[in-house]
Image (tube, grey):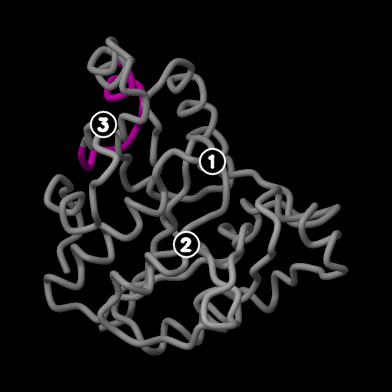
Amino acid sequence: MMGRSYFVTGTDTGVGKTLVASALIHLHAARGARTGGMKPVASGAFLQAGQWCNEDVLALQAAANVALPAALVNPYLFRRATAPHIAADEEGRRIDLDHLVQCHAQLMQACDVLIVEGVGGFVVPLDERHNSDELVARLGLPVVLVVGIRLGCINHALLTCQAVLARRLPLVGWVANVIDAQEDQAEAMIESLAQRLPAPLLGCLPWSPGMNAAQAAARLTWPDPA
């Protein structure tokens, strides 16, 4: 069986992409598939045992049931938590899309399912000429959209959907993640999106700051069985 890979994007930064990506890894691993995660580009690092680490990358690695080389899981890690092209310029580095494609191909050799988590939203600059949506298009990955449920999310979700479809990529589903505890119209927002997004709702994650990948996975469905 050929391996499958999916790209997890979001309506913005801080909307729960890592939680959903980790949950999807957990879900497929629980079905017996060799499942790993990839974070091609990450901004924001801290020192741990003398190594620069990123919280998102560590979460994906923790959810996986296959050991993968760190250099392939996260080819580009930048210390400052800012837009990748700004962080790369600051460190005198460049993000090479060809290298990312090669890393993805190597990971696919070890995985039945590979969940790739984006950085920020769907169209994030990687350098002066390339954005993150170009990488997804080059990889040809089906997309899962994480919608952070808060004021303004309907517009952000619909625009992101348009950007995905403009790249001729399939939107396999979306996840509603309530990130504003004070939002009393969350259900109405989710219903509006369900009527407008041309993809199934894979699950709703309630406001729960301590939710882990296994708990989130229990709230998700997946249209393509492992």
Between label 1 and label 2, give the one nearer the viewer. Answer: 2
Residue on which disc 1 sits:
13
Q: Is mark 3 on a helix, strand or loop?
A: loop
**Residue 135 located left or right of residue 144:** right
In the picture, the disc for residue 207 is: 3
Q: Is residue 199 left or right of residue 150?
A: left
Q: Which residue is drawn at 48% across and 50% down?
A: 169
Residue at 41 percent across and 48 percent down: it is 17
Q: State left or right for residue 113 relative to residue 54.
A: left
Q: Residues within 10 Å of mark 3 (few under 14, many from 20)?
A: some
User: Which tag, 3 or 1, sits closer to the chain's start?
Assistant: 1
Residue at the location (35% across, 57% down)?
21
Q: Position of residue 143 (x, y in %)?
A: 42, 51
Residue type for callout 3: Trp
Q: Looking at the picture, how far across and down is residue 38, in whole percent?
A: 46, 70
Does 95 sit above or below residue 163? below
The secondary structure type at the circle numbered 1 is: loop
Mark 1 vs 2, N-terminal side: 1
Which portion, as a residue range, is magenta?
A: 192-203
Instruction: Point out residue 212 in the picture as x, y percentages from the top left corner.
Output: 24, 54
Magenta stretch: residue 201 in it? Answer: yes
Question: Label 2 belongs to which residue?
Answer: 55
Mark 1–mark 2 contact, CB under 8 Å? no
Residue most toward the front?
Answer: 49
